[in-house]
Image: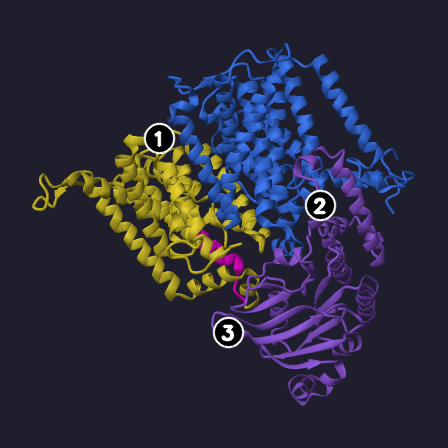
Chain colours: A yellow, B purple, C blue
Amino acid sequence: MGFFFETLIGGLMAGMLYSLVALGFVLIFKASGVFNFAQGAMVLFAALAMARLSVWIPECLGIDGRVLGNTLAFVVAGALMFVVAWLVERFVLRHLVNQEGATLLMATLGVAYVLEGVGTSVFGTEVYKIDVGMPKDPVLILEGSFEGGLLINKEDFVAALVAALLVALLALFFQKTSTGRALRAVADDHQAAQSIGIPLGRIWVIVWFVAGLVALVAGIIWGSKLGVQFSLATVALRALPVVILGGLTSVPGAIIGGLIIGVGEKLSEVYLGPYIGGGIEIWFSYQLALVFLLFRPQGLFGEKIIDRV
Amino acid sequence: MNAGGEVVLDLQKVSLSFGGVKALTEISFDVREREIRAIIGPNGAGKSSMLNVINGVYRPQQGEIVLRGQRFTRMTPYKAARAGMSRTFQNIALFRGMSVLDNIMAGRNLRIASNLFQQAIWWGPARREELAHRERVEQIIDFLEIQHVRKTPVGRLPYGLQKRVDLGRALAMEPSILLLDEPMAGMNVEEKQDMCRFILDVNDQLGTTIVLIEHDMGVVMDISDRVVVLDYGRKIGDGIPDDVRANPEVISAYLGATH
Amino acid sequence: MLYRENGQFKTTYAADQQTFPIAQDRWAILAILAFAFLGVPLFVDEYLLRAILIPFLILSLAALGVNILVGYCGQITLGAGAFMAVGAYAAYNFHIRIEGLPLLLTLLFGGVAAALVGIVFGIPSLRVRGLYLAVATLAAQFLTDWVFLRVPWFTNYSSSGSVSVANLQILGWQIAEPIDKYLFCLSWLTVFALLAKNMTRCAAGRQWMAIRDMDVAAEVIGIRPMVAKLSAFAVSSFFVGIAGALWGFVHLASWEPAAFSVDRSFQLLFMVIIGGLGSIMGSFFGAAFIVVLPIALNQFLPALGRLLGVTVSTAGVAHAELIVFGVLIVFFLIKEPHGLARLWSTGKEKLRLWPFPH
């Protein structure tokens, strides 16, 4: 029983990281109708920037102290994500207003390539650690309920807390601010939103910037757990089934979808894997998404039936 | 004007709603062989919904469609096409990436007998068939006077010509019943006259039964044999143009209000 | 002055419905084919064949397949690599399990297997489209990746996980030297390009394009979406599957599932975007472009670096390649959504009028 719960919690933790990436997808889709394939590349880019800057900045300025160095690195990396958002709007989205979803999707594939290329040529291709001082030591919990208790990383708790905070902030941002309302209007209809005076370009910059920040947070958590490397870019592919499952337009959907996929992957790997061969993680989630596409295309929490034939 | 044929299309108590909104309420009317039957009514009266029900784009919650004695509770566009119905669209639904010729050739789809393998090889049955259909399509192109644009992608054509291509595609199916959704909407007088001429010629020369929706009262009264009047999804009048024009309910709902 | 159709009056519809209605086009195609079959073998070296020409031919075939689905039928796919894999592994299994099966049939069966799998994974297209469909096709990609990696039966219990074929021959013709491989692939491509051209200008092509442009209207004129979409998936996967089988048998000779990864799928999609969606010619342009670009960058960037006094590492070249690819994709989507093929036809249009454009 203890083992089952440990697997479950491991799955939840992995799922939370998917959720964060999926959240980036959902934000951009809600506000621009763009299915952003570059989200994974953004996570990679942000994480690389964070990892390298947290070393370079203290070196250059001659400051000591991890907290100050990390804070500065975070600010600069955040600024970089803003630049990325601005460039994407200026050179890509602006020229593709009211194009079909598929065209926009392919354009973001192009953006992903550029980000990966620039990221790796500027920041390097090795495996880097991000050290933001997350507690590493494992703790035992619920010793009373199970024999031997459950072995949990403190780090995972902190990460979960950060993720929850982020989601709460985003929900507030969408529901309570006028920018959030404008974002939702833009998502409904580009031209209509423009005609009532919503500055489309600025909205897109904002939402890509927010998605960039989400990517940065996801990158930091991922990087401090597993290190930053090129393969991080493929995390977008892992998170795709999550958004299908949760519904492309739903923030809670992204979170819960991520958790379901995370848990499903781990449990299927552990309990199903031995019978049909290992490494089923990736396709398992995709087949799950496929089933959803066939029977409930709008996902668990999607607002409406979009793009149905 | 040939109003006396037998009933080919009979709608029986058709009701359609979207969510809670009733678009059509228990509408019944019939269409006779070789007649021009118009459906008129103010905006939002349910005219387009009516047409969409007839050829199966929308599925009514209640009611039946009887087509040449055959009952359809679940009509689909494909079944309608098979049964010899074709239609045009109010806001032109042409295949924008294809040439005029290809658009009209596409209308011959149900008459294509060669299979994919034969088409891939081209020489043989597929070629013979393509040429035969091309011949037929060229007659339609001649009839609609669009020879000069036959190889132009339809996206590049002006509105009036696109409407003609839309009609051409419907005619290519050699339908026994032709449904026209506002064939003259957005046209200038000259284009309207041309379109009227085409409709009357089709009816006259090919003996095609025509059901049309139209806004332009003058045109409708001139060319149609019988008229159905809808208002708020209900039928408020049905009969020959003169009777309909004299019907007080119709006058108050439609004629009186707008003319 | 040379390229014009003045005076070529067509007196029958048959003449107007030819594959290439303009006489100059007919001659040009014949000349290119003659050059490819007879001229090229006279001067190419092995490097050119192995690194450029053979990959170009096979990927052109795959791009043709992808273009039928994406360009003509409007169904986006990110899983073309999966169907290449199915073609390759199915052909491999026919090859080793059926003694004495002729090579031609082996490859064709590979294509048929891919077509069947294509139909299965095309079923979601009846329910969803656009980006949702893209995700569904990714499901095919990841499933096949896994199957060919983890299910040992498909690789005939090979311990390394890679499979290999040797001793290819047709009617005594040994396909061993690069020049033989080149001619072999060229023959396939020629035949299949012709088949594709025929299908796309016949009823089938009109059905696909009708579904792409306006599916409601297509149904109204009696096109069944299911038939049109699934036939596009089948034909497309058949082409891609045969390309996969050729890639494995002829180009690589020994391969692992990684040869048909999701990167390959993206690559094929880019080929048709850059080359031109809905254009047979565009598939060739796209394939040529994507095969040649990395090689050209490999030559060009270090040279440029030397000129500027910096050394460009191979890793640097790889990164630059990514950036150039990305920029080009965005560029084409914005500036020329119809790709190189449109540039080509605009050029031809100008040439027709030259030198009197008014």
Residue interval drawn in magenta? A197-209
Question: Does B97 sit above or below residue C117?
Answer: below
Q: Quadrant of the N terminus of chain A?
A: top left
From the viewer's side, name the closer residue of A3 and B5.
B5
Q: Which mark is residue C56?
A: none
Residue beneath label 3, please?
B21
What residue sits right under mark 2 in the picture?
Answer: B112
- Res C270 seen here: no
Would you name the residue on which mark 1 appears? A127
Majority SS type along the magenta span = helix
* Residue B179 x, y percent position in the rendering: 70, 65
Q: Kindly identify the amino acid type of the residue bearing the numbered disc 1.
A: Val
The amino acid beneath tag 2 is: Ile
Q: CA distance from mark 3 to mark 2?
A: 41 Å
Q: Chain of mark 1?
A: A
**Vertical placement of residue A243 versus C178, above or below:** below
- Pick the front one: C17 or A89: C17
Q: Residue at x 40, y 26 (%)?
A: C149
- Are both tags, 3 and 2, on one chain? yes
- Pick out the residue farthest to the bottom: B248
